[in-house]
Image (cartoon, grey):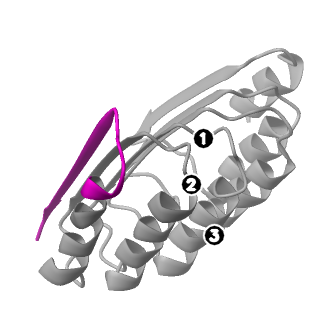
Amino acid sequence: SSIARFLHSSKTLSQFKLDAWWSKINDEIFTQICVELTSLPLETLHLNLGMTGITDRSLHSLSEALAKISSPLLAVKIGLYCTEVSDAGVKALVDALKTFSSLARFELCLNSCWLLTDECLNTLKELIVVCPTLNYVDFDLNNLRETTKESFGSISLLKSTREFEKFDVWWCN
């Protein structure tokens, strides 16, 4: 893809933002992009993927890429809208993020991702608990049909466990 070719030629890029609404990005193209991300000294990653062909395969590719990044990743913002991702994909992503002792900011929007359940919410809660450097949390979790008020509430309770620059969790079904 042209994005992957650009990344391949940009070896000093510390910030990467991809806004891909209604694009033809699918798992194969996204995997190519992820392969190129591994060679960048990334500090900030922002992916906005709405109404694309992204599935769990893409989240696993991203997780594998994050595991290979040696730079101190500071901030991650990911928006997934109407995509076919599941709890396993979100868990793979969170497990990769937990390895960054530098991660201070995590913003995640999961909107109308119908396959997600309370397990996803518990995974996000685990990230907050095990990442003491994380002081900016912004979750927008809308239309996740298989999640409950109780799981959402357990994430919200973490706000009182330590000081956060921002702790905002929005959930509605």
Q: Is residue 163 above or below residue 2?
A: below
The image quadrant of residue 119 is bottom left
**Badge 2 density bin: few <14, some 14–19, many ≥20, Cα 10 Å:** some
Extent of the magenta region: 160-173
| Viewer-proximal residue among 34 and 64 | 64
Q: Is residue 109 above or below residue 91?
A: above
Q: Are marks 2 and 1 in contact (CB under 8 Å)?
A: yes
Among numbered discs 2 and 3, the one appearing first in the sequence: 3
Q: What residue type is disc 2 on?
A: Cys
Q: Secondary structure at mark 1?
A: loop
Q: Which residue is mark 1?
A: 103
Among numbered discs 1 and 3, the one appearing first in the sequence: 3
Q: Which residue is mark 2?
A: 131
Q: Secondary structure at mark 3?
A: helix
Residue 105 in view: yes
Tell me the distance, in whole angstroms, between the alpha carbons under discs 2 and 1: 8 Å
- Which residue is depicted at the point 82% across and 42% down? 69
- Which residue is depicted at the point 56% across and 46% down? 25
Give the label, 2 or 3, closer to the camera: 2
Q: Is residue 10 above or below residue 64?
A: above
Q: Which residue is mark 3?
A: 92
| Viewer-proximal residue among 110 and 51 | 110
Q: Secondary structure at mark 2?
A: loop
Looking at the picture, how far across and down is residue 124, in whole percent? Answer: 43, 66
